[in-house]
């Protein structure tokens, strides 16, 4: 199944699969810490696609984009070359001009990293802007107020 066809599971989670490649690892052979941000970004983009939100079309139509306002990441255990991971993305809150997300990078032996993010909706000048109604409605599919385990 193509990645952009992944649908939410029963517990309002979007799951994005990732395999660890050599380019993702550091000299010790484990995933370089900054690459978890890349994995999470890809997963959020695919979550948007799964609810029919194309970021380029959104910008052309509404003049808004998404930007990470804050991120807290906890590294729990190392992932290694060729590991198969999943990024589980949940929406923890939808505010006027931002989203709160929790993303858990999961391996076969449990969670490897946990990210809590605030994603701002901004206009062309970088000023906070209200989330368009269609975005808010689409993302409610993934709304899960509980924190989720990390």
Image (tube, grey):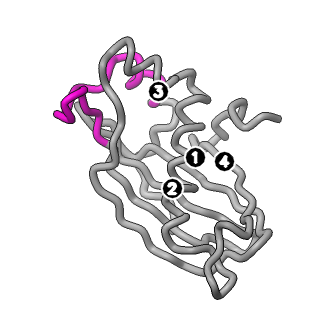
Does 85 appear above or below 28? above
Q: Indicate which label's residue lies in the foreground, 2 or 3.
A: 3
**Residue that badge 1 annotates:** 43
Q: Indicate which label's residue lies in the foreground, 1 or 2.
A: 1
> Residue 16's mark?
4
Alpha carbons under labels 3 and 1: distance apart: 14 Å
| Label 3 residue SS | helix
**Residue that badge 2 annotates:** 103
Range of the magenta residues? 120-139
Instruction: Give the residue displayed 51% in from the left and 73% down from the top.
Output: 33
Of the numbered discs 1 and 2, the one sitting upstream in the chain is 1
Depth check: give the residue in front, 60 or 94: 60
- Label 3 CA crowd tier, 10 Å (few <14, some 14–19, many 20+): some
Alpha carbons under labels 3 and 4: distance apart: 18 Å
Residue 11: x %, y % from top left: 60, 44
Image side of residue 78 versus residue 20, left or right? left
User: Is residue 133 found inside the magenta-colored segment of the image?
Assistant: yes
Alpha carbons under labels 1 and 2: distance apart: 9 Å
């Amino acid at each position: 199944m193509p990645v952009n066809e992944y649908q939410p599971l029963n517990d309002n989670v979007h799951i994005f699969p990732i395999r660890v490649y050599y380019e993702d690892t550091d000299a010790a052979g484990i995933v370089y810490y900054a690459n978890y941000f890349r994995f999470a970004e890809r997963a959020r983009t695919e979550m948007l696609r799964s609810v029919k939100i194309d970021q380029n079309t959104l910008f052309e139509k509404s003049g808004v984009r998404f930007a990470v306002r804050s991120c807290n990441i906890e590294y729990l255990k190392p992932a290694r070359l060729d590991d198969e991971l999943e990024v589980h993305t949940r929406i923890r809150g939808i505010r006027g001009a931002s989203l709160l997300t929790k993303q858990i990078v999961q391996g076969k032996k449990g969670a490897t990293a946990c990210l809590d993010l605030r994603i701002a909706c901004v206009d062309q000048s970088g000023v906070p802007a209200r989330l368009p109604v269609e975005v808010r409605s689409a993302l409610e599919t993934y709304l899960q107020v509980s924190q989720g385990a990390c």
